[in-house]
Image: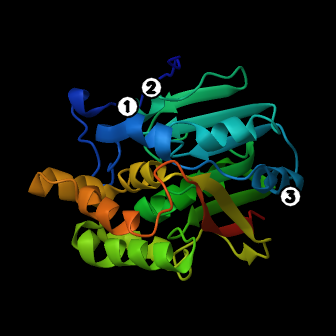
C-alpha cells in the first residue's frame, strides 16, 4: 500500500502536541477499513461541480478522509488542497501530483484569501456545520466561487434488504449514532449553510455487492463501531443471519443504491 506524504500546518497540532482529537472524530480508529469499504462517488458529480466553478485552478476538499473526493477533483482542477484532522485517515490516501494533503481541522485551510474556485465537503459537513468553518470557507472562495457539500443517505436495494438495513440502523445501532448524524437522515435539509442554495441535479451511488461487502460497509458506520466497542459484540454477525435468509448465495451480488443529497451555493 502506498502512503501519502502530508504536512501539518504550523498553527495546527495533533493530540500528542496538546490538541485533543475532536469528539467528531469517529473514524480514525478504523481508517483502513473505512478506506476499503466505503463506496466511491459518481464521476458525474465532479464533472458537474467543475462545470459550475468560476475556474479550475484550485479546489479545497475539507475533511477529505482518505482522499476519495480529492482524487476525483484532481481530474478537473490544476491543484487540490485536501485537509483532514485525522492522520490515520490521511495515511490511507493515494498520492497525486496535483493534491496537497494537509493535517488540519476544518476551520484551518491554510489557504489565501479568495484563492479557491471550489470548496467541497463530502459526507462530513454534519460534523462541523458551524459559523467558524463557514467563515473560513467564505474567506478562501473567490467571488462566484462554489461551495458544495453532500451526504449519501441510507442504502437501499430490494424491499427486504432495505427494510432490514433500516431496522438495523434504527433499532440495533440507533442508540450509538452521534447526535450530528440526524442531518444525514434529513438529507442536510434545514442544516446551517454558508450561502444561498442553488439548484442541483440528482446523483446517486450504485454498486453491485455481495453479502459480505454489504456487511463490511455497515461496519464502517460510526454507530456500528461504537456498538462493538461498548458491547464487545459485532452486531453485523446477527444481521448476517437475517440477510442470509433471502440472499441467493454468498457470492451473489445485489444492486445497492445510496441516494446523494447535494447542497451548493455561490459566494458573491
One can see residue 267 in this view: yes
Earlier-in-chain disc, 2 versus 3: 3
> Disc 2 and disc 3: Cα gap in Å?
31 Å
Please state, as top left, top right, bottom left or bottom right, where the C terminus lies in the image: bottom right
Residue at the farthest left position: 231
- For the residue pair 30 and 57, the one nearer the viewer reads as 30
Residue 7, image x, y percentages? 49, 22
Marks 2/1 in contact by CB < 8 Å: the verdict is: yes
Residues under numbered marks 2 and 3 in contact, where contact means CB atoms less than 8 Å apart: no
* Count of picture labels: 3
Q: Look at the numbered disc 1 and give the secondary structure of its residue.
A: helix
Mark 2: few/some/many CA within 10 Å (<14, 14-19, 20+) = many
Is residue 100 or residue 233 the one in the foreground?
A: 233
Which label is found at residue 52?
A: 3
Q: Residues within 10 Å of mark 3 (few under 14, many from 20)?
A: some
Instruction: Indicate which disc, 1 or 3, sits on the residue closer to the N terminus.
Output: 3
Residue 88 picture quarter:
top left
The image's mark for residue 169 is none
Asked if residue 55 lies left or right of residue 39, the reply is: right
Check disc 1 and report the residue beneath it.
Answer: 88
Residue at 45% across, 69% down: 246
Q: Is residue 101 above or below residue 233?
A: above
Going 26% across and 68% down the picture, which residue do you hit? 173
> Residue tagged by mark 2?
91
Q: Is residue 12 visible?
A: no
Amino acid at each position: 500500500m502506498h502512503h501519502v506524504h502530508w504536512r501539518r500546518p504550523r498553527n495546527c497540532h495533533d493530540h500528542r502536541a496538546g490538541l485533543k482529537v475532536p469528539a467528531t472524530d469517529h473514524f480514525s480508529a478504523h481508517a483502513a477499513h473505512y478506506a476499503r469499504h466505503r463506496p466511491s462517488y459518481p464521476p458525474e458529480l465532479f464533472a458537474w461541480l467543475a462545470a459550475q466553478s468560476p475556474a479550475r485552478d484550485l479546489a479545497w476538499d475539507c475533511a477529505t478522509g482518505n482522499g476519495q473526493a480529492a482524487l476525483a477533483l484532481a481530474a478537473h482542477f490544476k491543484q487540490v488542497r485536501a485537509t483532514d484532522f485525522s492522520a490515520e485517515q490521511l495515511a490511507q490516501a493515494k498520492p497525486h501530483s496535483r493534491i496537497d494533503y494537509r493535517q488540519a481541522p476544518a476551520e484551518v485551510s491554510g489557504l489565501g484569501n479568495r484563492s479557491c474556485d471550489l470548496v467541497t465537503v463530502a459526507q462530513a459537513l454534519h460534523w462541523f456545520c458551524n459559523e467558524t468553518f463557514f467563515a473560513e470557507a467564505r474567506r478562501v472562495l473567490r467571488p462566484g466561487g462554489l461551495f458544495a457539500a453532500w451526504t449519501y443517505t441510507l442504502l437501499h436495494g430490494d424491499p427486504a434488504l432495505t427494510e432490514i438495513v433500516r431496522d438495523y440502523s434504527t433499532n440495533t445501532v440507533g442508540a450509538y449514532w452521534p447526535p450530528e448524524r440526524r442531518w444525514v437522515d434529513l438529507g442536510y435539509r434545514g442544516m446551517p449553510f454558508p450561502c444561498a442554495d442553488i439548484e442541483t441535479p440528482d446523483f446517486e451511488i450504485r454498486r453491485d455487492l455481495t453479502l459480505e461487502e454489504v456487511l463490511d460497509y455497515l461496519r464502517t458506520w460510526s454507530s456500528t463501531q461504537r456498538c462493538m466497542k461498548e458491547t464487545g459484540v459485532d452486531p453485523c454477525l446477527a444481521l448476517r443471519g437475517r440477510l442470509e435468509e433471502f440472499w441467493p448465495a454468498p457470492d451473489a451480488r445485489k444492486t445497492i443504491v445510496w441516494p446523494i443529497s447535494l447542497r451548493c451555493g455561490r459566494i458573491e
